[in-house]
Image (tube, rainbow, N blue to C red):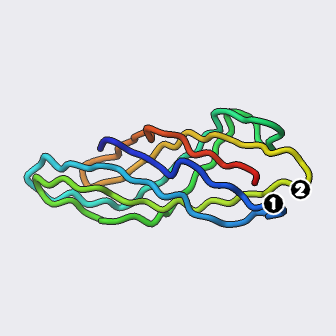
């Protein structure tokens, strides 16, 4: 597993409350074995790394998203592919007239596969901003 990445950011609409949106991720996968590798689960951990302005969470807080949607579910022997992962998230926007704020999240993925569990951290962070 290598080269993990996520959407760079999302701007939450003014006045939104717990509004659902998706974060999209990619992970490059290479199967160097002689057997097909199957992926049975992927979860993502979003850790708040930095804030600007007033933010509801404190730096270091984590959100673990489980049962994620991903594709493909297997990598054939000797093949290289890019996995796509969808992470459900939600945001609350600022009150009209309030200052814009943002939170920067480090995203790590844990993949449960037929040959073991692998963890990889996204090369970029995901920022949620209040619009």
Residue located 80% across and 63% down the image: 17
Q: Looking at the image, do the residues carrying marks 1 and 2 touch, with CB atoms under 8 Å apart?
A: yes
Q: Is residue 60 left or right of residue 24?
A: right
Q: Outermost residue toward the front?
A: 97
Q: Is residue 2 left or right of residue 105?
A: left
**What residue is pinned by disc 2?**
95
> Residue 93: x and y, percent?
79, 57
Q: Counting other residues with Cα less than 10 Å from the Cα at mark 2, is it few (<14), some (14-19), or many (20 or more)?
A: some
Image-quadrant location for residue 13: bottom right
> Residue 7: x and y, percent?
51, 52
Residue located 43% across and 38% down the image: 123
Q: Earlier in the sequence, mark 1 or mark 2?
A: 1
Residue 29, labelled with which disc? none
Q: Outermost residue toward the right?
A: 97
Residue 14, labelled with which disc? 1
Residue located 15% across and 60% down the image: 76
> Residue 48: x and y, percent?
65, 38
Q: Quadrant of the C terminus?
A: bottom right
Give the CA distance from mark 1 to mark 2. Answer: 6 Å
In terms of secondary structure, where does tag 2 sit? Answer: loop
Image-quadrant location for residue 25: bottom left
């Amino acid at each position: 597993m290598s080269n993990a990445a996520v959407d760079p950011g999302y701007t939450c609409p003014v006045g939104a409350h717990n509004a659902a949106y998706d974060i999209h991720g990619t992970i490059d996968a290479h199967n160097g074995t002689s057997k097909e590798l199957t992926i049975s689960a992927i979860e993502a951990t979003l850790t708040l790394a930095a804030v600007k302005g007033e933010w509801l969470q404190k730096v270091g807080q984590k959100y673990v998203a489980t049962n994620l949607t991903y594709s493909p579910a297997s990598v054939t022997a000797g093949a290289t592919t890019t996995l796509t992962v969808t992470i459900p998230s939600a945001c609350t926007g600022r009150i009209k007239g309030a200052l814009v704020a943002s939170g920067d999240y480090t995203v790590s993925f844990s993949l449960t596969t037929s040959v073991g569990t692998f963890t990889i951290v996204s090369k970029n962070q995901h920022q949620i901003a209040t619009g």
